Amino acid sequence: MKNKNYDKKIFRLVSILNKLNGGGKVRSSELAEEFNVSIRSVQRDLDLLNLTGFPLDTQEKGIYCFMPGFSLRKLMLTNEEASLLTFFHEIADSLGDNFSESFRSLVSKVLAREDASPFYVKLPEIPAHMKNFPFVKELEQAIHEERKILIKYESAKGVSEYRLCPLKLINFDGFWYVLAMPEGKRQFKKFRSEKIKGLELLDESFDPPRNLKAVLDRSVNIWFSEKPGEKILLEIDKDAAHYFKKKIYFPEQRIVKEKKDGTLILQTQANFNEVLRTIIQWIPDIRVLKPKELDIKVRQLLNAYLKGSRPRWG
C-alpha cells in the first residue's frame, strides 16, 4: 500500500529544491506554514538535504540557500531526481550500516564535482547567439516529408532567397548547418543555421540522392563535397606521424608507406577545399607530394599571408 507520508515528504523535498535551485532563499517558518507541518519537520528536511550532499548555507537564523556556485543544473539532476536521492538516503540509513555505506558511496559518485573527475574533454565554445537553431521544427518536417523549402538567407551581400531540397541538419565543429540541394541541381550546399532569417515549407516534393549517407560517412569537415575528388599524396614528418596514425584528418585517409626514419606517406581522395585548411594547420610537419596543383595552391596561400594580403581559398 502506498504510504501518503512518503508522498508528502517527497513533495516537500521537490518544492524546497525548486525554490533553492532558482538561486532563491527559503525560510523555515514560511515552509512550515506552506506545507502545514511543524518547523521541526521542515528543519529535518533541510538537514537531510544537507547530509545527502546538497550544501546549504545559513545566512540568518531560519533562512537557507545553496552554497555559492552550487546548482542542480551543474550536476545534471532534476529537482525530482534530487529529491528522490535525498529520500532514499534517509531510507538507506534505516536499513543498517552496510546498506547505508553503499548508498553513500553511490551518492558521492552521483554528486561528484566536475573537477573531481579524472577525465576532462575540451569542446569548442560557441557564442550564445550561434547556439540557437531557428526553424528547426520546420526543417525536421521538411526533411522527413521530403518537401522543398524557401529560405531567406543572410550573407555579406545581403539577404537572398533560395528554393532548396533540404537533406540533413548537420553539425561540424559545434556549428549547425542545413545540408541541401538548390532546386533543379544535384549538388550539395551548406547553409549556416543562424543566418537563416525566414523559412517557408512548400507543397512540392523531391527525391533525395541515394549517395547521401556515403557522402556524409566519408566527410571529415564541413568542406566535403558530393564528388569524391582526386587522389592526393601527402608526406607527414616523423614528429607528427603518431597523430596521423591515431586520427583520421582527411577523407579516406590511409598510410601507403612508412619510411625508416618514421616519416609517413599518406593518401586521401578529396577535393582541394576539404584538405587545404588541414594542410595549412599542420605546416611545417606536412608537405604535398601530388598533385602539383594542390602544392601550388598551398604555396599561394602562404605567400599571400606573408605579403599581408587576404588569401583566396577557392
Image: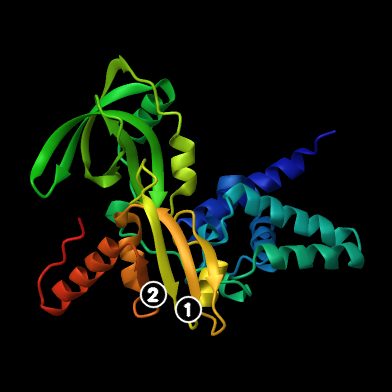
Measured Cα–Cα span from mark 2 to mark 1? 8 Å
Res 240 label: 1
Tell me the mark number nearer the camera, choosing from 2 and 1. Answer: 2
Res 286 label: 2
Q: Quadrant of the N terminus?
A: top right
Left or right: 152 in relation to 101: left
At 33% from the left edge and 44% from the top edge, which residue is drawn? 177
At 28% from the left edge and 64% from the top edge, which residue is drawn? 292
Residue 34, placed above or below residue 275: above
Q: Picture coordinates of residue 157 (x, y %)?
A: 8, 46
Name the one closer to the observer, 176 or 295. Answer: 295
Query: Do we see residue 111 in this rendering?
Result: yes
Q: Secondary structure at mark 2?
A: strand
At 20% from the left edge and 69% from the top edge, which residue is drawn? 301
Q: Picture coordinates of residue 84 (x, y %)?
A: 69, 50
Q: Picture coordinates of residue 66 (x, y %)?
A: 52, 66
Crowd rating for badge 1 (residues with CA inside 10 Å; few <14, some 14–19, many 20+): some
Name the one closer to the observer, 75 or 160. Answer: 160
Query: In terms of image quadrants, where is residue 297?
Result: bottom left
Q: Picture coordinates of residue 13 (x, y %)?
A: 63, 51
Q: Are marks 2 and 1 in contact (CB under 8 Å)?
A: yes
Numbered marks: total:
2
Crowd rating for badge 2 (residues with CA inside 10 Å; few <14, some 14–19, many 20+): many
Left or right: 74 in relation to 189: right
Res 81 label: none
Q: Secondary structure at mark 1?
A: loop
Q: Amino acid at mark 1?
A: Ala
Name the one closer to the observer, 60 or 157. Answer: 157
Q: Quadrant of the C terminus?
A: bottom left
Q: What colouring does the structure picture have? A: rainbow
